[in-house]
Structure formats: structure tokens, C-alpha cells
Amino acid sequence: MTQAEKNMDEDIAIRLRGIKTAFGSHVIHDKLDLDVRKGEIIGIVGGSGTGKTVLLRTIIGLKKAETGTILLNGRDPNAFSAEESRLSRQDWGVLFQDGALFSSLTVGQNVQVPIKEFYDFPQELLDDISCSKIRLAGLPMESAKQFPSDLSGGMRKRASLARALALDPAILFLDEPTSGLDPITASRFDDLIIDLRDALGLTVFLVTHDLDTLYKICDRVAVLGDKRILINAPLAEVEKFDHPWTQDYFNGERGRNAFNVSKLNMKI
Amino acid sequence: MSFIEGDEETYRLEARGNWAIENAKEIFSAISNLGTLSRKAFIINFSGLEGLDTTGAVLVRRLTKNLGVYGLVMREGLTPSQENLLALVENKFKRVTAVEDEEAWYFKMLADVGVATETVVSGVGRILSFVGQVLGASLRAIVNPSRIRWTALVKQMELVGLTSLGIVGLISFLIGGVIVNQGALQLAKFGADILVIDMLGIGHLRELGILLTAIIVAGRSGSSFTAQIGSMKLNEEIDAMVTMGMNPIDVLVLPRLFALVLCLPLLAFYSDIVGLAGGALMAWVQLDIAPTTFVSYLQTAISFDHYMVGITKAPFFAAVIAISGCYQGLNVHGSADSLGLCTTKSVVQSIFLVIVLDAFFAIFFTALDI
Ligand SMILES: Nc1ncnc2c1ncn2[C@@H]1O[C@H](COP(=O)(O)OP(=O)(O)O)[C@@H](O)[C@H]1O
Ligand SMILES: [Mg+2]
């Protein structure tokens, strides 16, 4: 292995090789390869039901791949001992598509759950941290005392982000974080992700349908289709990629609009 | 390793090390232990910082705020991205605890009494209005059977009736056997062991058969009604139903209520037969009474009324179990905790009501001389 290749390897946060997943005889992914570099925001796009959520669940170990290897920061999570596996949970935060907050705990307590799992902090510090994360995610302070069932869908997403950020993870998995948010809130969400990436060097694995988000924050875009990653490249290349779904998606009316807005923003 | 070092003379503090979540506890206590400082201005130097994450930023804010009590605070040596992170964390901050503040105990006690009274009163009101709605819907359905959801009804009958045959049969058989076994031992002292058949006949047909069946069904089906309807409630499926113009009482409650009202008498009959069979077997083994003798003695000793008393109670018990199961299911709101609580309530409530109702029936039938 040459030095350059070795450096490349150290730069990889997530490496998937030959992944195959299936539910019974229903194959979702086959021979899927993907590399995500450290510190980059990668956008995963694909039609509904192409298996974006399943891919995310496979990477974080909630679903077993039938074949193939997964390396997170160069290590195979399947080879971890039980304790290593527990500790490795600190390295990533997940925002599930439906929030998945604990319904019997307040938002503040939800954010404190992962912290309490790993650290023994005084309550004052816990409150301090959880409130900061809640503000950081763009929720009003009062939400800390509220229960998830008292929040709107968008607020629940933000509460869930606050919980995903609780341990300052190195990799952040976001499953359609801006779907169901109004455009202004969604755009603030995007700003927040960039700020966090710049300040903390996060790697962000972002499943999204939101073209504005793709244009605004993603360094690279991976298109999921035909059970594998069709292309994983900067947006400019993906736009030109010759595949019916990709062409429809980026060069349809909505795609053009988002593209024009992003051009406009650059000029301003 | 020390994370902050202060110098009283120069008003300068040096922040060092990795201000990250893994060191947060030590940094927190270092900040808390700074003590009173008689200075009017402070400069915190962060150039020695090895790392800063959001928890670190929270601690920086905390340090700044603590020192701010004594005087002006300035920070230096932060990189732009660290400044940025601090700005994110400092944005309009006000700390709120994650749970509601506690009241003083004497207020809390009064408040608890008030809340409990209100819960009981409004609970009775709501349960009565629910029973009324269910009765209304049942009458409409009986007058106009096309409103009945037959598929759901048959499905529920299978779930509450057919699948509970095993457990109801097993328990009735054992109890029938045990009554004969224990009763015969006592009655033998009077040389009247044959009377154990009277005892089994009256006890099992009038009371035990139906009571056992009702309690098993309350535990099995009442709880599952609550859990099914409750999780639909949590999932907003009931709201979705209402917006589609479907009435949850028609769709969810009636099939369960009708299924149970139809099945519980059948189950009670089955339990009676199996219980008698258990008793007959025990009588054969223990007292050497042949099954044919058992049956012919039973026919002369036990009047048909005893059986009718038991079976008459079944539909009423069924209604109590189904209504309290469904009512508690619709009562679930908010969280998974609430689901658990309501399921417990539904089972306890329906068993309690079944036994109370049974006591009333006993008084009623005695008064009628049946
Ligand atoms: N638990 C499951 N059991 C069976 N099939 C599933 C399950 N979860 C997802 N699938 C199937 O996997 C496919 C991909 O789903 P998903 O990853 O959720 O899609 P999306 O790309 O919209 O997130 C779908 O066809 C779905 O039917
Ligand atoms: Mg999905």
C-alpha cells in the first residue's frame, strides 16, 4: 500500500463494501459500495422505498447485512466485543425518521438519557448541557419541560436532533431531518448542520429529499437506485449523471428552481 | 491535570487541556471551586486549549457567567470556529430544569387531594357517557344490522372465544377435580361423600364456572383490547379514523363488545361441562363412583335453574369486561407509560366489577328464590 492510499484510508469515516441486505426474499441492496470521508456532509438521495432508511439502519447495526463489510473509522463494528460496542455508541448520533423520542420522558430528560448512560454528571451540569443542546437545535427553552406528545412534528425532529447531539458524536446520521419542516426552519436547520460540522469536524450522513438542503450543505451526493449507489460525487457531477431518475430529480422543475436559488445566493 | 489556573495578581485565567464531554465533570468542579474572586475584570486565555466540543462550550459559558458576577470578562485565544461554537451555545440562553419545579409539601398535599377528587368525579362522568354512547351505538346496530362490521366481529370472536378454549378448559377441569377431591375429604367425615356431587354441581354451575371464565377472559382479552386500542390512539390512528368519518365506537368497540357478549356464555357453558368432567373423573378415581352413576345422580340432584343462573350472568360480565377494556384503551394518551397504566387499570377494574356484579346477582337470585 502506498502512503497516499494509506492516507486515503485514514480519511474514511464510513466504508461499505459489497453490502447485501434483504427482508426474506425481498432484496433491498446488492453489491453496494460507499465511502464517506471524515468531515464531509454526504447527501443520500433516492426514490421512496429505495432503501435509504434500511441502509442507515444497516450502518448503525440495527439491521444485519447478509454479506459485505462495514468499516466505521476503519474498524468493523461486528468484530467489537459487547463493551466496545457499547462504548462505540458515543461515536455516532442518530436522528430517526420519526423522531423516536422516549414518550414518557420530557425533552430535557430525553437529551440527558445518553449522557447519563456514559457519564456521571451532577444534575446542574446535566440541565446546563441539555438546555444548550435544545437551544442549539433551535427549540425554545420551555420545551425542555414538555413531553414529546405536546410538541409539533417539526419540534419533535429538533428535539430528536438535540438528543442525537448529546454526546458530541463524530458521525451524525440524519434520516430526512427537514421533511415536514417549513422552509425557513429547514434552512436554519441546514445552517446549524454546517456550523456544527465546521466547529466540531462532524461527518454527516444525511438522507434527504430536500433539494435546497442538497444544494446548500452537501459536499457530495450519493444516489441510491437499482439496489446500489449509482454515483457518489459532488453535486455538479451528479446533475450531469445519465440515469433517468437522477435526470428527473435534478433537472425537473423543482430541481431547476433549487439550482437557480443556489446560484442567486452565491451572487449575493 | 488542571484545566483552569487563575492568577490573582494579573486577573488572567488560563484554560488548558481538552474541554470535551469526557472531562466535563472535572472542569465543572474546577469552575465551581474557583471561589470568590475580588477582581473587577478578568481575561480568560484559551490559547492552550487542546479541543472544544459543545459540552466544553457550555462549560465556557458557565465559567464566563460565574465570573461575570464579579466583573467584566474577556476571552482571548479562541479560534474562529471555536468562537462560532460558543456563539451557537450562548444564543439567548436561560437554564430550565428538565422537570417541573416541586411545590411546597403542604400545597402539594392540598393540590393532590383536589386533583384526585376531580379525577374521580370527572372519571365517573366520562365512563357513564361512554357507556351511554356504547349502548346507543349497540341499539342502532341491532336495529340496523348492516352497520355491524361482520369481519371484525368474527375475527374478534376467534380471538376472544376460540383461542381461549385451551386455558379455560384446563383451569375448569382442574378446579372441578380439586373441588371433588377436597370436598369429599370433608364430607366423608359425615359419611356423606356422595353429596360432593351436589356441591360441585351447585358451586361450579352457579358461581365458579362463570366467574373463573370471566376472570380469565378479563386478563386475556380485556387487557388486549386496551393495548390494541391504546397503541392505535398513540399512533393517531383513531384521529385518522375520525377524520375519515368512521366512529371509533362502531369500528373498534362494538365488534369487541358483541364478540365477547356472544362468546362468554359459550365459554361459560364449556367451562361448566369441562368442570363437571374434571369432577366426575376425580369422583371415579377417589370415591369409586362410576361416571354413569355420577351423571344419573347429577340429573336428580341438580335442577336446571343452577345452570341457568350461571349462564344468565355471562353476557353482563362480558359487557363489563369489554366496555372497561375499550374505555381504558381510548383513555390512553401521550406516552408508553400511559398505555401500561391503562392496561393495568382495565384488568383490575374489570375483575373488580365482575366480582361486585356477581355479588349483586347472588342477592338478586336469592331474593327470587332461584
Ligand atoms: N421491517 C421491514 N420488513 C420488511 N420490509 C421492509 C422493512 N423495512 C423496510 N422494508 C422495505 O425496504 C424497502 C426500503 O425501505 P426504506 O429504507 O424505509 O425506504 P426509504 O428509502 O424511503 O427510506 C421498502 O421496499 C420497504 O418495503
Ligand atoms: Mg426512509
Image (spheres, rainbow, N blue to C red):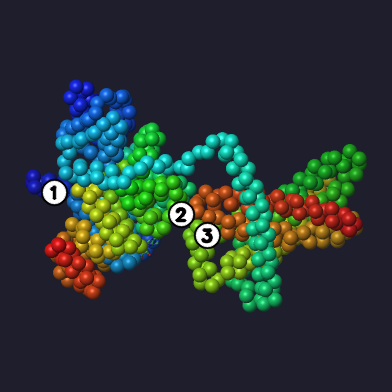
CA–CA distance in space, label 1 to label 2 = 47 Å
Name the chain under label 1: A
* Viewport quadrant of the C terminus of chain B: bottom right
Binning the other alpha carbons within 10 Å of mark 1 as few (below 14), some (14 to 19) or many (20 upward) gives few
Q: Indicate the position of residue B210 as horizontal and vertical percent values.
A: 75, 55
SS assignment at label 3:
helix
Q: Amino acid at mark 2?
A: Asp
Residue pointed to by mark 2: A150
Q: CA distance from mark 2 to mark 3?
A: 15 Å
Give the distance between the C-alpha atoms of the residues marked 3 and 1, in whole angstroms. Answer: 51 Å
Q: Is residue A32 visible?
A: no
Q: Which residue is mark 3?
A: B233
Q: Is residue A104 left or right of residue B95?
A: right
* Disc number for residue A8: 1
How many residues crowd around disc 2 within 10 Å: few (fewer than 14), some, or many (20 or more)? Answer: some
Q: Nearer the viewer, residue B326 or B314?
A: B326
Q: Quadrant of residue A260?
A: bottom left
Residues at discs 3 and 1 in contact (Cβ within 8 Å) = no
